[in-house]
Image (cartoon, helix red, strand yellow):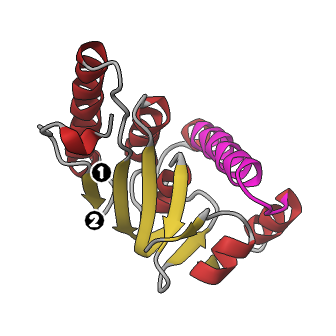
């Protein structure tokens, strides 16, 4: 049975439209947990219950990698599918969050942006080495995610990284490269 036939306790349209930080992801994470809990309860009560997807609309220039990864872990492990929709921009860490959606949509005017992981390090030599190793680990995770979910070639990303280039990807190119499933309508 459709979720529309039963009252909803929580909205299923969520918005991330700021810099990614603990403060901006905590309510989204909480909402995803609550929707999953409600859907779990309804599955026990109604045999014909179907989970209606959560839509996470994103318009962000990026932000904290670790806070973004917390949100990604929740999205990927959500029993209720989370569809991500890029409206405006999904740049830097926001691109990574957007990629985590079970289905990915782009607005016709949307722009995605990829660049290598960046970090400001002020430390002694050994501390900077540790930071560099962590940045490389995170970079490998991101490259693997993009290559695994699209037709983008690893060599393309490695070239961009080596040139310290930013890659702006308009919506139509995101569709062509299979980064996005389709346009959001």
Label 2: which residue? 18
Residue 149 lies within the magenta run: yes
- Of residue 133 and residue 150, the one placed in the foreground of this image is 150
Q: Quadrant of residue 99?
A: bottom right
What residue occupies the far right of the structure in this picture? 155
Asked if residue 86 lies left or right of residue 137, the reply is: left
Q: Where residue 185 sits: x, y (%)?
A: 43, 74
Which element type, helix, strand or loop, lies under badge 2? loop
Label 1: which residue? 21
The alpha-carbon separation of the residues under discs 1 and 2 comes to 9 Å
Taking the spot 30% from the left edge, 20% from the top edge, the residue there is 40
- Of residue 132 and residue 83, the one placed in the foreground of this image is 83
The magenta span reads 129-153
Q: Where residue 123 sits: x, y (%)?
A: 48, 45
User: Is 173 located above or below residue 154 in the figure?
Assistant: below
- Residue 165 appearing in the image: no
Taking the spot 64% from the left edge, 82% from the top edge, the residue there is 172
User: Is 78 located above or below residue 163 in the figure?
Assistant: above
The residue carrying pointer 1 sits among few (fewer than 14), some (14 to 19) or many (20 or more) residues within 10 Å by Cα, namely some
Taking the spot 55% from the left edge, 38% from the top edge, the residue there is 127
Q: Where residue 42 sits: x, y (%)?
A: 24, 22
Q: Are marks 1 and 2 in contact (CB under 8 Å)?
A: yes
Taking the spot 37% from the left edge, 35% from the top edge, the residue there is 51
Q: Quadrant of residue 18?
A: bottom left
Q: Please give the count of numbered marks on the rendered protein.
A: 2
């Amino acid at each position: 049975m459709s979720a529309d036939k039963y009252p909803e306790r929580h909205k299923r349209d969520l918005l991330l439209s700021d810099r990614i930080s603990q403060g901006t992801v905590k309510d989204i994470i909480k909402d995803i947990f609550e929707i999953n809990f409600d859907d779990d309860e309804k599955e026990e009560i109604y045999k014909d219950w179907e989970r209606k997807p959560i839509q996470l609309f994103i318009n962000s220039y990026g932000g904290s990698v670790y806070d973004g990864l917390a949100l990604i872990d929740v999205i990927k492990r959500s029993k209720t599918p989370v569809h991500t929709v890029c409206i405006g921009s999904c740049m830097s860490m926001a691109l990574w969050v957007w990629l985590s959606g079970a289905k990915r949509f782009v607005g016709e005017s949307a722009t995605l942006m990829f660049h290598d992981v960046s970090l400001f390090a002020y430390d002694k030599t050994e501390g900077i080495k540790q930071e560099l190793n962590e940045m490389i680990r995170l970079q490998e995770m991101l490259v693997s995610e993009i290559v695994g979910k699209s037709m983008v070639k690893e060599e393309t990303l490695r070239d961009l990284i080596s040139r310290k280039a930013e890659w702006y990807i308009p919506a139509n190119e995101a569709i062509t490269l299979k980064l996005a499933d389709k346009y959001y309508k």
